[in-house]
Amino acid sequence: MQISTKQKILIIDDDETLCKVIGEELEQENYFATCSFSGKEGLTKLKLEKYNLVILDYQMPEMDGYEVLQEIRIIYPSLPVMIITANTETDTINKFATSGVSDIVNKPFEFEDLLARIKICLLKT
């Protein structure tokens, strides 16, 4: 039996299509990718399984990305979290930057750029 060395990435985004596309692309790059379509679902998955990185959307119903990030920091203070957002307001970016996120990626983005940033985040861990 061989132990897998694939790194596990949790994608939390209410845009199911985008979430699935990112997940499929990451799988092709030899990562394990899991999608959650709400903050609450993502937090449940984090409590059940260990991940190497979380990709988290900012604007979601019920629980926005900042609220999810605060909960992640309580459970896993050092887990790398990347924020993806279409909101480029300075206050929003500053709020995340001072909350210990690993990176902030603006939507729309090219997958190659996202992948490069993921690799950098995972190398820092």
Image (cartoon, helix red, strand yellow):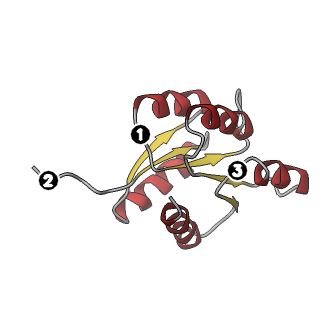
Residue 10 x, y percent position in the rendering? 48, 45
The amino acid type, in three-letter code, at marker 3 is Gly
Residue 45 x, y percent position in the rendering? 46, 32
Q: CA distance from mark 3 to mark 1?
A: 19 Å
Of helix, strand and loop, which one carries label 2? loop
Residue 9 x, y percent position in the rendering? 45, 50
Of helix, strand and loop, which one carries label 1? loop
* Figure quadrant of residue 26: bottom left
Where is mark 2, residue-wise? 2
First in sequence: mark 3 vs mark 2 = 2
Q: Which mark is residue 50?
A: 1
Q: Are marks 1 and 2 in contact (CB under 8 Å)?
A: no
Residue drawn at point x = 77 percent, y = 54 percent: 97
Q: CA distance from mark 3 to mark 2?
A: 35 Å
Q: Which mark is residue 100?
A: 3
Residue 24, above or below 49? below
Residue drawn at point x = 83 percent, y = 58 percent: 88
The amino acid type, in three-letter code, at marker 2 is Gln
